[in-house]
Image: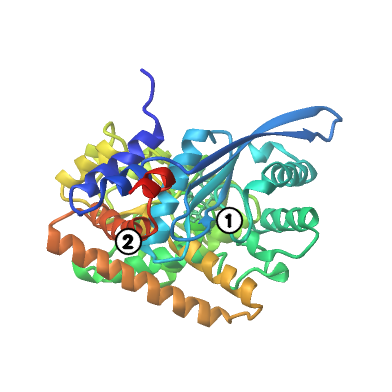
Amino acid sequence: MESQSLFVGARQNLDLALKHIAISEDAIEHLKHPKASLQVSIPVRMDDGSLQVFQGYRVRYDDTRGPAKGGVRYHPQVSLDEVTSLAFWMTFKCAVLDLPFGGGKGGITVNPKQLSRLELERLTRGYIDAIADFIGPDVDILAPDVYTNATIMGWMMDRYNIIQRKSCPAVVTGKPIALGGSAGRETATAMGAFFVMQTILPKFDRPPAETTVAIQGFGNAGSFLAEQIYRAGYRVVAVSDSKGGIYAPAGLDIPAIRQNKEAGRGMEALYCHGTVCNMADHQLITNEALLELPVDVLIPAALENQITPENADQIQAKLIFEVANGPITFEADRLLNQKGIYVLPDILTNAGGVTVSYFEWVQNRSGLYWSAAEVEQRLAERMTRETERIWQLAQSLDLSLRTAAYVHALDRLRAAIEVKGTRDYYAQAKA
Ligand SMILES: NC(=O)C1=CN([C@@H]2O[C@H](COP(=O)(O)OP(=O)(O)OC[C@H]3O[C@@H](n4cnc5c(N)ncnc54)[C@H](O)[C@@H]3O)[C@@H](O)[C@H]2O)C=CC1
Ligand SMILES: O=C(O)CCC(=O)C(=O)O
């Protein structure tokens, strides 16, 4: 059976939210299509002298509220369909947080783990050569996503500056601090999710010490969040990376696991190094099994389509915080709702990253840099405020938190699109 397009699935949430908001037919039509999509071939000279051509993408989904904004993913599964979905989600995410940005996203179909550092740098610079006319600090601003990081963002900015023959730090966020990056961007996605948790969990009378948590994905988002919630006193009982996970009902020593992971060890090895190896009650588990553990809180923080109609019924968590983009399919979301499981949606929960990216863009453009404490305080204010608003909206309209988040975003998008008018200039001239 051919699998459904990710973008078709993503748009189903928009259709659902449209039932709960008065919005013009023009604005609806506008929001159903990406504004511009670019696919490029990137030739790269490999270390062995051969030439390999990679496929790259950048999609600007909507820029009514400001320049498009969104990360760049390096992963073997990257496709135009995936990048379009991610750009669609960015559009709603930026509106949820009231950032003056539209939504964009990029990617390259590649397994970066198979490239040397120099090949990775040549690929990155080649990507910027290929998309330079499509991006810019006032047009479309890049950032990190899966398997990209601050070093790669630095290469992107450098290549863009060389092409433009001037310094344009605001074309990319998530850069190294030495190159104009913001304090707090590296941990921003995790911190944003943490503030959402801190706003929501008290409503369920869930003190940290009595709350068990499982986290799928131990990268930028998942590992910093694991450490943050561990330090806040929650019991993190399971974590995983692409190779599998570990489960210890008594709780894991997350700082030790992070240290071992940074030293380049796999999940099994990292559990058996350092202080954690003394705990007898741990077991290795698959990523699939992690999702079905008897925990209070489940945090998917890896890739899309992890919870589907096939496993939705086995999910035991009472609350799911979507740190990954699109980890739950539309149909699975419906089933989880029926089971009374609360899902804090991606377009809210993981918005801390793009929020601090916005702060970085503001700092780059003003030339005035903020302290880590100032960044964190501004992030906490915004995440808490918008989480509370979505919670209230869900309560008052009796909606799921996801639909409430879409309605909240749509209200802001609608206002901008309707005031600006459509792109159908001929019809406007006639009217
Ligand atoms: N980095 C950021 O600022 C933001 C990231 N996100 C989303 O968070 C998710 C994770 O992104 P990052 O942490 O940045 O990526 P990352 O590249 O830092 O880490 C990805 C993690 O996922 C694991 N992983 C990969 N395939 C897996 C699989 N099949 N099963 C389980 N784990 C798997 C990897 O081992 C790694 O631990 C993605 O959905 C991304 O779009 C969302 C907002 C911002
Ligand atoms: O920091 C950004 O601009 C975007 C991060 C991102 O790609 C995401 O939120 O999915």
Q: Is mark 2 within 8 Å of ligand 2?
A: no
Q: Quadrant of residue 292?
A: top left
Image point (58%, 81%), residue name: 371
Image point (53%, 47%), residue name: 105
Q: Residues within 10 Å of mark 2 (few under 14, many from 20)?
A: some
The image position of residue 132, as x and y in percent, is 69, 48
SS class of the residue under badge 1?
loop
Q: Residue furthest front?
A: 430
The residue at which mark 2 appears reads as 415
- Residue 280 horizontal side relative to residue 27, left or right: right
Question: Of label 2 and label 1, which has the lower sequence position?
Answer: 1
Q: Quadrant of residue 16?
A: top left
SS class of the residue under badge 2?
helix
Give the camera-side residue of 203 and 431.
Answer: 431
Image point (38%, 69%), residue name: 383
Determine whether 194 is above or below 79 in the image: below
Give the camera-side residue of 246 and 58.
Answer: 58
Asked whether disc 2 touches disc 1, contact meaning CB atoms under 8 Å apart, the reply is no
Type of amino acid at the residue the image marks with label 1: Val
Type of amino acid at the residue the image marks with label 2: Ala
Q: Residue furthest right?
A: 49
Give the camera-side residue of 253 and 360.
Answer: 360
Instruction: Name the disc covering residue 91, or none.
Output: none
